[in-house]
Amino acid sequence: MFNEETRFDEPLRWAMVGGGRGSEIGYAHRSGAQRDGLFRLVAGAFDLDPARCRDFGTNLGLDPARCYADYRALFAAEARRADGIQAVSIATPNSTHYAIARAALETGLHVICEKPVTFRVSEAEELKRLACERNRVFGVMYGYSGFPMLHQAREMIRRGELGEIRIVNLQFAHGFHNTEIERYNPGAKWRMDPQVSGPSFVVGDLGTHTFFLAGMLTGLAVERLCCMRQSFVASRSPLEDNAHVMLQFRGGAVGTLWASAVNAGSTHQQKIRVVGEKASLEWWDEHPNQLRYEVQGQPVQILDRAMNYLYSEVPSIGANRIGAGHAEGFFESWANLYYRFALAMDAADRCDTATLDTLWYPGIDAGIDGVRLVECCVESADNEARWVQF
């Protein structure tokens, strides 16, 4: 079970850039970060409109003087305070991530960033260099990766229960954008604008999530891929609202990735299926407390979260917040990740390399791989789906 007694002398002083009033993702960050008392929200630049930012932050209980007009003012003013912020989460549109993250690292802050962290791999690698130079933690918010059953799957694969991995099938294919909803939905509109979203819509927005899970579970590295993408809602071109990717992993395993926002009738359909020579595992984010385990020649087994037949001794499994039979969900997953980000930040501040070397969390390398996925898919799709090296 989760250890709620983990405490620091003082919570990490934390701020947000973006995630203001009405932001679903902003609420998820605040709920996850403050769940266990390891972070305390003390400042923010929540909105492009300073008055709205101040009003929103005040309603959250912040000092109005620490609700800033923009991220530059936030970082500069907080750096002058003895009780200034130690960490920041970036929950803004994609085009702003690199500049804000770079400024945060240069100010000496730990960073948690939405994905994709940048538009280009070279920019993401520059952020990694800065984080390493300044001994700062850079977490990437792959929010689904905190579900305990994914870590059970990871350990089963590591222990060889599936045998050699042959196939990894990935999908994140919902139907909520099957029509041109961006015409009247500002929250969707920027995602279809290449100046703000970047060179991809669904591969960057959806595909990077399940792609990260593939590497997290299997440890396999992609060698090359090919991609075809479509804009079924024509006004979204050149950005895709549907994409199919074929993956070839080092060592011989193969895979597919389907990312779509036009899978009409689907609620989410984020799934990962790992097929080995002896057995297969399948996880579906709409039923995150269960893991489907299929051994050739045996009945299908549905493994449930927090049961005593699971590998409870695995450190990353020890995030169950309530006993078996009770549903845990999205916010618990985010809280599990923020818990690990906090432990990493505390260890970095204490120069505790032993803890950092053994602590799992989605870091900047995961962010770099996500940006590389987008770059390679765009290159492949724009060249008649030719294979490209990853």
Image: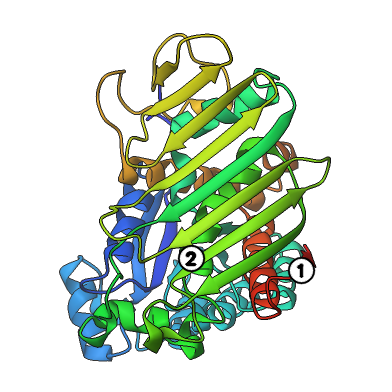
Residue 193 image-quadrant placement? bottom left
Choose the circle earlier in sequence order: 2 or 1.
2
Residue situated in front as seen by the camera: 153 or 180: 180
What residue did someone put label 2 on?
114
Residue 95 picture location, percent across and down: 51, 83
Which residue position holds label 1? 129
The location of residue 137, given as percent across then percent down, is: 62, 57
The residue that appears at 31% across and 77% down in the rendered structure is 188
Q: Amino acid at mark 1?
A: Arg
Judge by depth and name the residue closer to the eye, 78 or 117.
117
Bin the neighbour count of mark 1 within 10 Å (Cα to Cα): few under 14, some 14-19, many 20 and up: few
Q: Identify the image quadrant of residue 104.
A: bottom right
Q: Are marks 2 and 1 in contact (CB under 8 Å)?
A: no
Rendered residue at 82%/46% (across/down)? 250
Q: Nearer the viewer, mark 2 or mark 1?
A: 2
Q: For the residue carrying disc 2, how many other residues have a C-alpha within 10 Å: few (<14), some (14-19), or many (20+)?
A: many
